Image: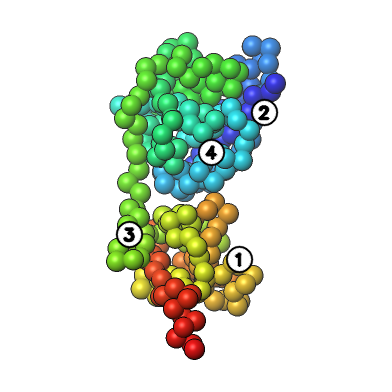
């Protein structure tokens, strides 16, 4: 069976950084007489934006086969005392810096985490400025070839978690915030659809105090008009059909989003009578 490794970084593709990491992994696989399949998730995460990297992993990882290794490097703390980490969660393995990048996979029970500390699973010389190549890529390759993550180093019980905007229930409403703006200008929120189900005509969504209607998909909205919908990753998002919600609503990461209900369908029906 061919091992699969995905790559998620903020490196871009102009420089050789991504190719260097791939070269390391392919070399380890060839030395073992094995093959690896390397899949690029994205290398266009905004520079140093750990939250954006975490959301990219959250969106992509569930669609890969069990046992896939997800190598992720968004690492403004490279070379400092921050740990290297391997996480086993939901049938997936994740490798990268312990800086909150794996937060979406550490919120439920059942995960295991290990510090990448064993010298046998890194390059002989480790640059302080490129752990992606010298530390994380070798660990990812060995995991994809069948290494158990507990061979990499000691167990970690306190991995770093991002300070996600808290989703709160307040007076019958659910309050959250924008956590990301994608390349289309859609506002991805901290509110999962399961927190506000069912989404029906009784639901009111406000973004930064401005009310927007619910829609099933982008094409249900009039061109240029905003609306709220459940995105493909299961989070509530705010979009403008063929436009840019962030620009139109003057919203960004941290902008408040509130989902509330007007009244139940039965009460609305009785009033109409």
Camera-near label (1 vs 3) is: 3
- Circles 1 and 2: CB atoms closer than 8 Å: no
Residue carrying label 3: 169
Residue carrying label 4: 8
Camera-near label (2 vs 3) is: 3
First in residue order: circle 2 vs circle 3: 2
Question: Which type of secondary structure does the marked residue at label 1 adopt?
Answer: loop
- Circles 2 and 3: CB atoms closer than 8 Å: no
- Circles 4 and 2: CB atoms closer than 8 Å: no
Q: Is residue 119 above or below residue 248?
A: above
Q: Is residue 26 above or below residue 227?
A: above
First in residue order: circle 4 vs circle 3: 4
Residue at image point 46% right, 14% down: 151
- Circles 1 and 4: CB atoms closer than 8 Å: no
Residue carrying label 2: 37
Relative side of 77 to 38, left or right: left
- Circles 4 and 3: CB atoms closer than 8 Å: no
Q: Which mark is residue 57?
A: none
How far, Cα to Cα, is label 4 from label 2? Answer: 15 Å
Q: Is residue 204 above or below residue 152?
A: below
Residue at image point 43% right, 12% down: 119
Q: Quadrant of residue 250?
A: bottom left
């Amino acid at each position: 069976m061919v091992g699969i490794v995905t790559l998620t970084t903020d490196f871009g593709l102009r420089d050789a950084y991504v190719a260097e990491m791939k070269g390391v992994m392919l070399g380890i696989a060839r030395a073992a007489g094995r093959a690896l399949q390397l899949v690029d998730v994205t290398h266009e995460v905004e520079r140093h934006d750990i939250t954006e990297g975490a959301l990219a992993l959250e969106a992509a990882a569930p669609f890969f086969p069990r046992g896939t290794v997800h190598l992720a490097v968004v690492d403004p703390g490279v070379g400092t005392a921050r740990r290297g980490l391997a996480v086993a969660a939901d049938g997936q393995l994740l490798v990268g810096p312990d800086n909150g990048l794996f937060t979406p996979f550490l919120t439920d029970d059942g995960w295991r985490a290990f510090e990448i500390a064993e010298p046998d699973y890194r390059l002989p010389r480790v640059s302080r400025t490129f752990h992606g190549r010298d530390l994380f890529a070798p660990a990812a390759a060995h995991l994809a070839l069948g290494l158990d993550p507990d061979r990499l180093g000691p167990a970690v019980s306190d991995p770093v978690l991002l300070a996600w905007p808290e989703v709160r229930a307040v007076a019958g409403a659910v309050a959250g915030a924008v956590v990301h703006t994608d390349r289309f200008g859609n506002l991805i929120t901290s509110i999962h659809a399961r927190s506000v189900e069912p989404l029906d005509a009784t639901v009111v969504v406000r973004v930064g105090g401005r009310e927007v209607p619910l829609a099933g998909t982008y094409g249900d909205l009039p061109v240029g008009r905003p609306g709220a919908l459940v995105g493909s990753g299961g989070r509530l998002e705010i979009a403008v059909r063929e436009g840019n919600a962030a620009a139109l609503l003057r919203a960004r990461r941290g902008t408040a989003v509130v989902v509330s209900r007007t009244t139940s369908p039965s009460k609305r029906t009785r009033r109409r009578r």
